[in-house]
Image (cartoon, helix red, strand yellow):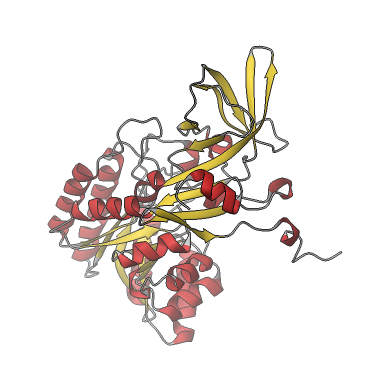
Amino acid sequence: MNTYEDVAAAVGTPFYAYDADLFRERIRRFRAAFDGTPHTLCYALKANDALALVRIAAEEGLGADIVSGGELAKALGAGVPASRVVFSGVGKRREEIRDALAAGVRVLNVESLGELDVISNEAASLGVVAPVSIRLNPDVQADTHAYVATGSAASKFGLGLEDARAAYARAAADPALEPVGVSFHVGSQLLDPAPVLAAAEKAADIWRELGAAGIPLRDLDAGGGLGIAYDGGEDAAVEPYAEALAGVARELGAELVLEPGRWLVGPVGTFVTRVLYVKQAPGRRIAVCDGGMNDLIRPALYGARHPLTLLTEEERPSGPVDVVGPVCETGDFFALGVELPLPEPGDLLALGQAGAYCRVMASTYNARPLCAEVLRERGAYRVIREPVPAETLAAHEAL
C-alpha cells in the first residue's frame, strides 16, 4: 500500500495513518536539544498509545510516561524498560500501584497524601522500597484551553506547597518509601514555555528547602506540554525551552525528566475519511463524511481546528464547506465554513496534525466500530491496528 487510496481499498475508511520517519526525526530533534544535560526522556502514552509507535519510541531510547495500568502493560509490551517508566496520574488504583512496583518502575508521581499511604502499604506488602516524586501544584496559569490546563491552584492535579512538604516529610520517615524527585506539569498545547519555567523555579525552591532539611532529591520532572501548530504556523520551539530548563537542572545538580507527547507525535498522524454525501442548506454546502466525532473528537471537545485537505488532483472550484460526520450530534463536525475545493461523494479528505489525542480518544458511540491504523515505513504503509468488526461490538455483553 503506497497511497491513501490503496490503504482505503485495503482497510476501508476512515483510518489513521502515521509517518514513522517523521516520528523518529522529531524524537531525535527533541533529544538533541538536551544534549549535555543529564535527562530521561519519556514518551507520554496518553497522546497516542499505538504499540507500533511506542515500540519506535523504545527503539529510540525513550522511556514512557504512563497514567494507568493499561498503559504500563502497553509500554512494557512494546519494549520500554520498567526502569524508564514514570507513573503519573491523579487516580491510580491500588492494583495499578502494586503492578507498577512489582515491575520496578523508575518512579511514581504522587498526587495526594492518601495515594502516598496506599503506595507505602503496597510497597511494604511486596517487600520493596517505592521511589516517589511529589507532584507540586505550582499555581501557575498557562495560556491554553481550560480542559488541558493543569497547574492552577484549583486544579485536581498535584499538591499545594504545604501538603507537598507534609508528603516529603512522611515519605522520608517511611522505610517503604524513597523520595527521589519533584514533579510538576502546567498544561498541554503550550506554545509559550514561560509558564513551565515559572513552575520550574517554584519546584527549585522546594528542592533546595528539602536538601537543607536532609532530604536529597534526584529528579526534576518538568512534565510535557509543548504544543504544535494546528494552524500551519510554527510549533513551540524546543531549544529555548531546553536551554532554560537545563539551566535550572544544572544549578540544582538534578536529572531532568521530560514527558513529551503531542509535540513528538501530533504532526506524525493524518486522519483520512471519505465523503459520503454532499448537500445544500441555506447558505451552506455540507460534506457528510464516514468519519465522525467518535473517531476524532477534538473539534467537538475543544473547538480544535485541524488542517483539512481534499485529496484530489482534479481542478475544482473552491468555496466554504461544512465538513461533518455521521454521528447524531450537532457537534459532530470537523470544520465549519472552511474554504476547500468543493468536495464530491467518494472523495477522500485528510485531517492533518492528527497523531496526538485523536485515535487514542476514539469511542464506539452510535455503535460505530473503531477504525484502522496504518504506519508508513520504507515508503509503504502497513496495518498496525485492524479495524474493529461491527459484529464484535457486543462480544462482551449479555442479554
Residue 269 x/y as whole percent: 44, 46
Outermost residue on the front side: it is: 314
Q: Residue at x 63, y 16 (%)?
A: 284
**Of residues 229 and 120, which is closer to you in this image?**
229
Q: Residue at x 33, y 57 (%)?
A: 183
Outermost residue on the top side: it is: 283
Is 221 situated above or below 231? below
**Which quadrant holds the C terminus?**
bottom right
Residue 140 x/y as whole percent: 35, 41
Asked if residue 130 shows in the view, the reply is yes
Q: Is residue 120 left or right of residue 215?
A: right
Residue 61 x/y as whole percent: 28, 66
Question: Quarter-wise, where is residue 327 in the image?
Answer: top right
Is 322 situated above or below 40? above
Is 369 situated above or below 384? above
Is 84 situated above or below 144? below
**Of residues 256 and 248, which is closer to you in this image?**
256
